[in-house]
Amino acid sequence: MNDCPYSYANHWSNARHLIADDDRADVIEAALQAHAPEQAFDGAQLAALHYADKLTRQPGKMIEADVASLRQSGWDDGEILEINQIVGYFNYANRLLNGLGVTTAGDVVGYYKND
């Protein structure tokens, strides 16, 4: 969502490993790359992804209804705070990486070893 190739390479590698289903991971990745999470998610997860997208790309346009939508989808206030904190942190960290020109060149991508 915020165009950080370094973070995407590392975190998607880890997510793919944890999903442990290549077909499902492919569907999720395609949906996220197309900015169409509804192709892979629904319900509370989809609401959280819409919130994350708006907070990432249009933070100045966040309104009370964005939080209300999360509540209506089943998230409680503690979970909403966690979603907010995680999205905010990753936006901050990714901007630092982008601002310094950090790349994956020479890195081992992802936390998990390939079998």
Image (spheres, rainbow, N blue to C red):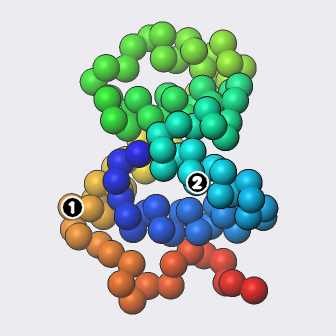
At x 53%, y 37%, the residue is 36
Q: Earlier in the sequence, mark 2 or mark 1?
A: 2
Few, some or many C-alpha atoms within 10 Å of disc 1 (few <14, some 14-19, many ≥20)?
few
Give the residue pinned by disc 2. Answer: 29
Which residue type carries mark 2? Glu
Badge 1 marks a residue whose secondary structure is: helix
Q: Is residue 109 left or right of residue 92?
A: right
**Label 2 SS:** helix
Give residue 2's position: percent from left, percent from top: 35, 48
Three-letter amino acid code at disc 1? Gly
Within-10-Å neighbours for mark 2: few <14, some 14–19, many 20+: some
> Considering only vertical position in the picture, is 26 above or below 75?
below
The residues tagged by marks 2 and 1 sit, at their Cα atoms, a distance apart of: 25 Å
- Using the rendered view, name the quadrant where residue 97 is placed: bottom left
Q: Is residue 112 left or right of residue 88?
A: right
Closest to the observer, 21 or 113: 21
- Nearer-the-camera pick, 34 or 72: 34
Image-based side of 67 in relation to 16, left or right? left
Query: Viewed as shown, does residue 30 lie left or right of 45?
Result: left
Residue with the most extreme bottom position: 106
Question: How many tags in the picture?
Answer: 2
Seen in the picture, residue 80 relative to 109 is either above or below; the reply is above
Q: Quadrant of residue 94?
A: bottom left
Say which residue appears at 41% left-offset and 45% top-offset: 1
Query: Residue at coordinates 68% horizontally, 19% vertically from top-left?
Result: 73
Quadrant location of residue 64?
Answer: top left
Q: Quadrant of the C terminus?
A: bottom right
Which residue is denoted by mark 1 in the rendering?
Answer: 99
Where residue 114 sits in the image (x, y, percent)?
69, 84
